[in-house]
Every structure is written in C-alpha cells, then in structure tokens.
C-alpha cells in the first residue's frame, strides 16, 4: 500500500515575498537531519516495490513506474555510506524534479518543511581533502537542531551518479 503526499512549494502565509527566507524539506538518514530545497520536491511517497536494474551501483535501488514515467530510485543511506538501509513504515521516497529529470531518493523519514533565513544558515566547514563537501550547501540551525543542507542538483549531476546530463549540445 502506497502513501502519497503532494508538497506545495509555497504556502498561503506569503513566505516567498521575503527573499532572505529559504524553504527546505527536512529528512532523516540515521541520526542526522538533512534539508533540500523545497522547490525541487515533487511529491513524497511511501516505500514501495522497486524493479532492480542489473549491474547498477549499489546505491541505485532500481526504478519505479510513476504514472508512466520511469524514475530511478537512489538510496541516500547507501550513497552516503551510513550503514545498512532498513526499510520500515517510516521509510519514504522523495520524488524530485532536478534539471527537468524526475528522480526518487529513499530516506529514513521526512521531518517537516522549515524556513531558514540567512542568519540561520552557515557556510560548509572546511575539512580539507578528508571529507568531500562538494554537495553540501551549508549548515542550518533551527533551535537546537543542526541540518545538513544538500545541493541536490550538484549531487545528482555528479559524474559518480550520472543521472543528469550536464553537457551542453
């Protein structure tokens, strides 16, 4: 049985009128909380049966047919090397529209939609070459929560993922 929830990028409060406000969908992977730009989110679905594709990287779980569109599904826990992925009633697939391509990401659970102003966002700390921070936009703070803000377009367009054609014809 599939749960489905459509996310509306803006609300009736008029948050889009404030250019210093950024809206993020937050989700959990293990003990960490991440945020992605709400404008990239198309919908949120329950974890359903996925058709596996032979010889695909481990983090690509397979594909689903979403209303006639074949959507690749990426398990973010495996992609970020956060241990074994366990699927339960809280596991969801976030359907994204990234550069005109529909992609699904499996996460442990969706938290909420939050607004961050520029004062709540910090630049990505420098780790040298020890940690690859290329796909991290920065860190966000809400009360005592720390969010890792992902640049989902850079991540999905990376050579390793190969999901978005970044070449110009």
Image (cartoon, grey):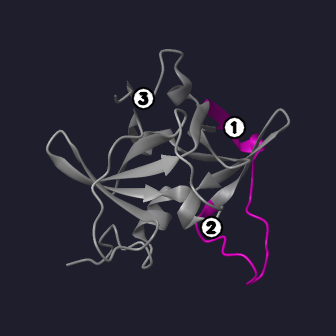
Which one is in front, 27 or 134?
27
SS state under label 1: strand
- Residue 60 visible? The answer is yes
SS state under label 3: loop
Asked if the magenta segment contains residue 117, the reply would be: yes
Label 1, residues with CA under 10 Å away: few <14, some 14-19, many ≥20:
some
Q: Which mark is residue 81?
A: 2
Sequence order check, earlier mark of 1 and 2? 2
Check the image and name the residue furthest to the top.
12
Point 63% across, 59% down: residue:
137
Which one is in front, 130 or 74?
74
Check the image and name the residue furthest to the left.
68
Left or right: 49, with 87 as reference point: left
Q: Which residue is mark 3?
A: 7
Sequence order check, earlier mark of 3 and 2? 3
From which residue to which does the magenta span run? Answer: 113-136
Residue 68 x %, y %? 14, 44
Left or right: 124, with 97 as reference point: right
Q: Tell us which disc is closer to us: 1 or 2.
A: 2
Point 46% across, 66% down: residue:
59
CA distance separating discs 3 and 2:
28 Å
Which one is in front, 91 or 70?
91
Looking at the rendered image, the quarter that the C terminus falls into is: bottom left
Q: Which mark is residue 117?
A: 1
Label 3, residues with CA under 10 Å away: few <14, some 14-19, many ≥20:
some
- When the figure is inspected, residue 83 is found, relative to residue 147, above or below; the finding is below
């Amino acid at each position: 049985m599939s749960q489905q929830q459509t996310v509306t990028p803006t609300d009736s409060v008029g948050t889009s009128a404030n250019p210093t406000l950024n809206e993020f969908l937050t989700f959990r992977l293990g003990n960490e909380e991440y945020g992605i730009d709400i404008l990239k989110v198309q919908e949120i679905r329950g974890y359903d049966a996925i058709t596996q594709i032979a010889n695909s990287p481990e983090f690509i779980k397979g594909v689903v047919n979403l209303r006639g569109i074949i959507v690749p599904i990426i398990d973010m826990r495996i992609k970020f090397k956060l241990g074994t992925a366990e699927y339960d009633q809280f596991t969801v697939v976030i359907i994204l529209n990234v550069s005109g391509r529909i992609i699904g990401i499996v996460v442990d659970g969706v938290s909420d939609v939050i607004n961050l102003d520029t004062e709540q966002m910090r630049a990505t700390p420098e780790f040298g070459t020890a940690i690859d921070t290329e796909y991290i936009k920065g860190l966000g703070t809400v009360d005592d929560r720390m969010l890792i803000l992902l640049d989902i377009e850079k991540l999905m367009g990376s050579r390793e993922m190969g999901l978005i054609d970044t070449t110009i014809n």
